[in-house]
Amino acid sequence: MPLNKLIQDGDNQDLTNERFKSTFDTDALAAVFHSGEDSLKRIREVRDEITKRGHLFDSLPAAHRTRAEKMEDVSRKLKNLMENVNEFADFTNNLDMLTIIRDVMGVEGFPLALHNLMFVPTIQNQADDEQTEWWLMDAIQGKIIGTYAQTELGHGTNLSAIETTATYDKSTEEFIIHTPTTTATKWWPGGLGTSCTHVILVANLIIDNKNYGLHPFFVPIRDRNSYSQMSGVRVGDIGTKMGVNCVDNGFLAFDNYHIPRRNMLMKHSKVSKEGVYTAPSHPKVGYTTMLYMRSEMIMHQSYYLAMAMVIAIRYSAVRRQGEIKPGTQEVQILDYQTQQYRLFPGLARCFAFVTAANTVRQMTESCIQELSHGKSDVLADLHALSCGLKAVVTHQSSTSIDQARQGCGGHGYSDASYLPTLYTCSVGACTYEGENMVMLLQLSKYLMKAAAKAEEGAVMAPLVAYLAKSEPVAIGDKFEKLLSHFEHIARHRVMHAYRQMIEEEKQGIERDYAFANHSVDWTKAARAHTKLFIARGFVKMVQEVSNPEVHAVLTTLAELYLSYELIEMSSDLTANGYLSESQVQEIRHQIYDCMKKIRPNAVSIVDSFDFCDRELRSVLGRRDGHVYENLYKWAQMSPLNQKNLPHVEKYLKPMTSKL
């Protein structure tokens, strides 16, 4: 039996030939990518159940629909799904829901996206027991629909500047929610535009004219039956975006709107009837929702990138273009070294990022558990790490997806490829839930403190232990040698930025201004630190794989990942004579050697991501490889192919008849 489990009669012959080259069992690699055989089995079970329910599918590609039609169609699928999801899936199980969302909804989102990702988790993590009993089951069952309203029209990542207020009135035991300025209008929350009945509102808590900072409040904004907005609430949709247009991002403002005292989420912070405030155990304990969201974002980005790699690599095996030697047969574009250089680093990043996502998710779940017992030791470390991962992974994923799009030539520009959709959804994450440059600067503040401790000779926490290490001498293992280069770059960048800043301080410049004057260096340090974390995690994952054939493939992918990322930072390797030009050139050649090893297995590697055609939504990336026939069918479905189009009948035909 072939090692690649996707081979079927009647497929494109080039694709079949690629699959017969596989040196490993694709199911075994799929189990690694999806975090174990049990997870892979469950994904396939849910997918099989979805296949039986044709009413959950698109009747027309989303690209052929208007935004209003997309919203209507995704809402129809959502309703049908909610009515029978309990027959085959667990709505509270993250794996089940991710599988369903990818398969049924696609990557452009749906009105309950933030409901699932932020509204429900915030209730779970920040509401006390009584509040959880009031609201959680209604939220899980969809009897109320919510979102998370934090960002304002004039203030995003700078939370300290948020203006919305929640002023406690002791006489009525109510909070008065108010939007004092236009810039204080909540802006961007997904689902807010037309779909939500409630929000978790982030607002400044005011008691007796004292501002206690930002706190979360459970706020009804629309009647759950009529959907009319509440008196004192102004809410609506903000319009189309670059992508993710199946989500109704909205605006929200309040005119002295009253809610009960117990609508403030009180698991960590409390306000008594008398207006006595009880602070949380840790000032950043309210960040749990954001930490959870960022861990999910990293996983989503990993899947967006993996989907793009499936599409581009399968298409590159089917598409023949040009001749390496004039007069010979046209070659598969996957045989060109330039195409491999475009795609294979992104392929390696899929495994690096999904490993990082699993690691940070486990760390987040552990941190939330510890917080419930009053422990907050790892919260600052995890918050800093999540900032860096969010920035690096979203940037590199979107960059690699765009390379995949360009690698598919003109067809990659077509919505039929699904690559433009994957790109716009991926690149949007570079700004939402924290703009990437600000995220890097937040991590930089953490690294600044670590650098100061390292200079003092203190014992370093595991996440920054490399700052206290001396330069490596002789390292035998190939992975250890490459990782030592990552450590050198991260240590050099962090300490360089820190010492530059300290020099300015010695000249009388305040630390905040000295930090700002070297913020570019600090962002470079934050990126290097984050890449080191990802690299370490990828190597650790590979070393734990017992299947020898799968281990061999992942070893090559990890070596490619490490070498490619180091060459992207090659100027740091030669600085101060750390490595010679010939040593850097050796790392560069490792990239080319790894690409040659990956080439025969490339199609089987992406097959191991185990996405079905419904999930990919790509004519270019179909399992059977019949690209050109299906591109033609896809084009025939365009609404512009119908007869008697208004713009033709009313404007173009009369104009041409007069020429």
Image (spheres, rainbow, N blue to C red):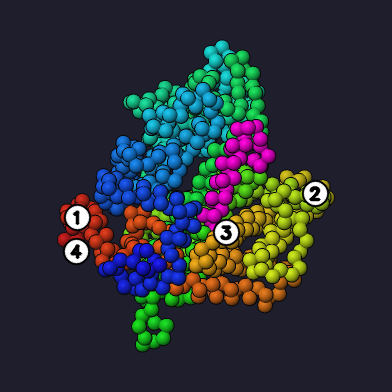
Q: Are marks 2 and 1 in contact (CB under 8 Å)?
A: no
Give the residue at the far bottom of this rendering.
327
Q: Which of marks 2 and 1 is nearer the N terminus?
A: 2
Q: Residue at x 45, y 50 (%)?
A: 39
Give amino acid for label 3: Glu
| Residue type for callout 1 | Gln
- Give the alpha-carbon distance from disc 4 to disc 2, as whole Å: 84 Å
Which residue matches tag 1? 642
Looking at the rendered image, the disc whose residue lies closer to the viewer, 4 or 2, is: 2
Residue at the spot of label 3: 544
Q: Give the range drawn in magenta.
A: 352-379
| Residue at the spot of label 4 | 659
Q: What residue type is labelled 2?
A: Ala
Q: Quadrant of the N terminus?
A: bottom left
Q: Earlier in the sequence, mark 1 or mark 4?
A: 1
Q: Mark 2 points at which residue?
A: 458
Relative to the observer, which residue lies in front, 181 or 127? 127
Q: Where on the picture, by quarter, is residue 161? A: top right
Q: Could you tell which of marks 4 and 3 lies nearer the N-terminus?
A: 3
* Whether residue 572 can be seen here: yes
SS assignment at label 4:
loop
Cβ–Cβ under 8 Å for marks 4 and 2: no
User: Which secondary structure lies at badge 3?
Assistant: loop
Find out whether residue 364 is within the magenta segment.
yes
494 or 366, nearer to the observer: 366
Depth check, mark 1 against mark 4: the one in front is 1
